[in-house]
Amino acid sequence: MGRSYRDLIAWQKAMKFVTDIYEVTQRFPSEERYGITNQLRRAAVSVPSNIAEGQARFSQKEFHHFLSQARGSLVEIETSFLSPET
C-alpha cells in the first residue's frame, strides 16, 4: 500500500467534509455546542482519521476494517440530519 493516505481521494473528500460539518454546525444554536454539534464534529473527524489509520496498516483486511469504521461514522452523521419522519 505504498502511497500516502494523503493521496487517497476518499481521505481528501473526507477532509473537505470535516470543514463542511464545522461550517454547518457553527450556525447551530449555542445551547447545542456540547450536544449535537460536538457529536457531529467528532464523527466527522473520525472519517478521515479512520481512512488514514487503515491505509497505514499492513494488510488489506485491516484497511477494510477501518474503512468500515469510517462508513459507520458517516451513517451516524446522516442519521443526525434525518428528521424523525424519514
Image (tube, grey):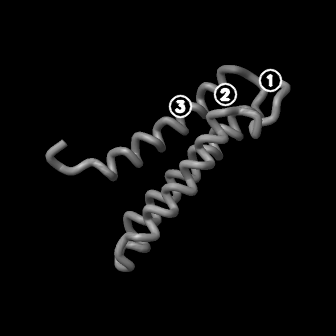
Mark 1 vs mark 3: which is more N-terminal? Answer: 1
Camera-side residue of 29 and 2: 29
Label located before the other in sequence (2 or 3): 2
Kind of residue at badge 1? Met
In the picture of the structure, the residue carrying the numbered disc 3 is 68
Residue 61, percent from left and from top: 65, 21
Residue at point 62%, 34% (across, down)? 10
**Quadrant the C terminus occupies:** top left
Q: Position of residue 16 (x, y in %)?
A: 59, 49
Residue identifier under label 2: 63
* Element on which disc 1 rests: loop
C-alpha distance separating marks 1 and 2 = 10 Å
* SS at circle 3: helix
Specify the label residue 1 is tagged with: 1
Instruction: Find the residue positioned furthest to the bottom.
Output: 30
Q: Residues within 10 Å of mark 3 (few under 14, many from 20)?
A: some
**C-alpha span from label 1 to label 3:** 18 Å
Q: Residues within 10 Å of mark 2 (few under 14, many from 20)?
A: many
Asked which quadrant contains residue 48, the reply is top right
Task: Choose between 63 and 45: the one closer to the eye.
Answer: 45
Left or right: 85 in relation to 42: left
